[in-house]
Image: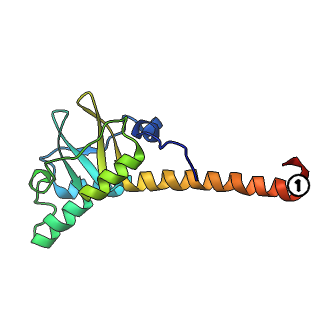
Amino acid sequence: MNNKPWKTVSELLGARRGTVFSIAPDSTVLAALEQLAEHDIGALVVLEDGRMVGILSERDCARKVELRGRAVKDTAVRDVMTRNVLYVMPSLTLDECMALMKRERVRHLPVVQDGEVVGVVSGRDILEDVAAEQAHSIRGLEWDRLVMTVNPGSY
């Protein structure tokens, strides 16, 4: 069993820290969808005067625009964004983020430090990190087994 402590959000963000894809609340949902597609992401932070006022996800677009018969080119982001944004601090661990995402049924968590959004963590980010860590552990175990098989006296 791996007793290694979970990474923090800050460690996961790493070099991406400070990269925040955002949109203004007066922008159209069409502009938001174009940005989501361009960056291959699932949510945008909605910023007004540098302050987070919401988050817009693909789910918001599907459920609050398309299913209600609205046109993406005529609907403002502010009309469909999620206003009560659940966010985390950089010191939170990834297992805590996963538990929060599961409990609150969200896929994206903006990361806020000193009142400023410094990144966004997605469920996919966490899953990819956990998978990479497990692959690294498996390679180590395979190497140990190989050494034991080839040179049993070294153990």
Q: Is residue 106 visible?
A: no
Amino acid type, residue under disc 1 in the picture? Pro
Residue 36 as seen in the image, left or right of residue 80: right
Q: Is residue 150 above or below residue 86?
A: below
SS for callout 1: helix
In this view, the residue in front, 153 or 122, is: 153
| Residue at point 20%, 58% (across, down) | 30
Residue 147 screen position, x and y as percent: 83, 53
In this view, the residue in front, 106 or 83, is: 106
Residue 108 screen position, x and y as percent: 30, 52
Residue 90 as seen in the image, left or right of residue 64: right
The coloring applied to the image is rainbow
In this view, the residue in front, 91 or 28, is: 91
The crowding category of the residue bearing disc 1, from other C-alpha atoms within 10 Å (few below 14, some 14 to 19, many at least 20), is: few
Q: Is residue 99 visible?
A: yes
| Residue at point 22%, 46% (across, down) | 86
Residue 34 screen position, x and y as percent: 28, 56
Residue farthest top in this picture: 114
| Number of marks present in the image shown | 1
| Residue at point 19%, 47% (across, down) | 85
In this view, the residue in front, 129 or 17, is: 129
Residue 14 as seen in the image, left or right of residue 83: right
- Quickly name the residue at label 1: 152
Q: Quadrant of residue 19?
A: top left
Residue 113 screen position, x and y as percent: 29, 31
